[in-house]
Amino acid sequence: MSELRHEWKHEINYMDMLIIRSRMRAITTPDAHAVDGKYFIRSLYFDTLSDKALREKIDGVDNRKKFRIRYYNNDLSFIRLEKKSKWNNLGTKEMVRLSTMQAQAIADGNIDWMVNHPDPLIHELYVEMKETGLRAKTIVDYTREPFVFPAGNVRVTLDYDIRTGLCSTDFLNPDTPTVPIVDNPIILEVKWDHFLPDIIRDAVHLENRRAAAFSKYAACRAYD
């Protein structure tokens, strides 16, 4: 399991984003994978027939997990299965590469090939899909501007243009239609390991803004 990390989330407005972007450009390093300072993320989220992951998020359950498949900038040569877990406001993420065929098979619910797969995360997803009815639920798209700071292994991101694929799971198709979520929010995320340097803490501080839970997945399920 990867190391547990701290995480803050703030829902901010456009002027806030301009302020944070300016501050981050002055003190941080751009993410090496960003193109012109940003990249596009598409995720396919999974949930049970009773929407366990969605209900736990809405109810504020401390210990929870969710599965998703993700790729960046419409590049299908690098697709990952990810499991994101939360324990008392600390988070961790496990991941493994998937081929396009494997990703499509999982999205379609064709999982027999997973039963003896050597990777533990793929096998864990198989067990969840067999025992809890976990299935692909919705596409979540957004644009991310990432900034990194080495001390504390800090990562600051600005996420916006969040869009939902409604009930579509055709996530490998770049032409799959998506629509903006309600209110078109902008999300500031700050993640770090053991400590958050004061220079970052001061730079992300905004008057009248407090850390608050926000789930892109939950927001994109609001149309169900």
Image: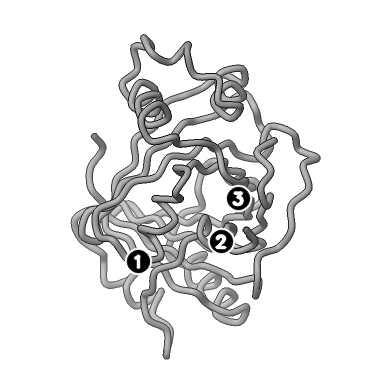
Q: Position of residue 93 (x, y in %)?
A: 34, 41
Spatial CA span between label 3 and label 1: 21 Å
Q: Position of residue 95 (x, y in %)?
A: 39, 32
* Quadrant hosting residue 122: top left
Of residues 135 and 162, the one drawn nearer to the viewer in this rendering: 135
Q: How is the image coloured?
A: one colour
Three-letter code for the amino acid on which mark 1 is drawn:
Asp
Query: Tags 3 and 1 in contact by the CB under 8 Å rule?
Result: no
Spatial CA span between label 3 and label 2: 12 Å
Spatial CA span between label 2 and label 1: 23 Å
Viewer-nearest of labels 3 and 1? 1
Q: Which residue is mark 3?
A: 140
Query: Tags 3 and 2 in contact by the CB under 8 Å rule?
Result: no
Viewer-nearest of labels 3 and 2? 3
Q: Which residue is mark 2?
A: 159
Query: Could you tell me which residue is drawn at 52 percent across and 59 percent down?
Result: 216
Q: Which residue is mark 1?
A: 59
User: Does dot 1 land on a helix, a strand or a loop?
Assistant: helix
Query: Could you tell me which residue is drawn at 34 percent across and 56 percent down?
Result: 154
Query: Could you tell me which residue is drawn at 80 percent across and 40 percent down?
Result: 175
Of residues 136 and 133, the one drawn nearer to the viewer in this rendering: 133
Among the two numbered marks 3 and 2 on one chain, the one whose residue lies closer to the N terminus: 3
User: Does dot 2 land on a helix, a strand or a loop?
Assistant: strand
Vertical placement of 146 versus 171: above or below? below
Furthest residue in direction bottom, as rendered = 208
Three-letter code for the amino acid on which mark 3 is drawn:
Val
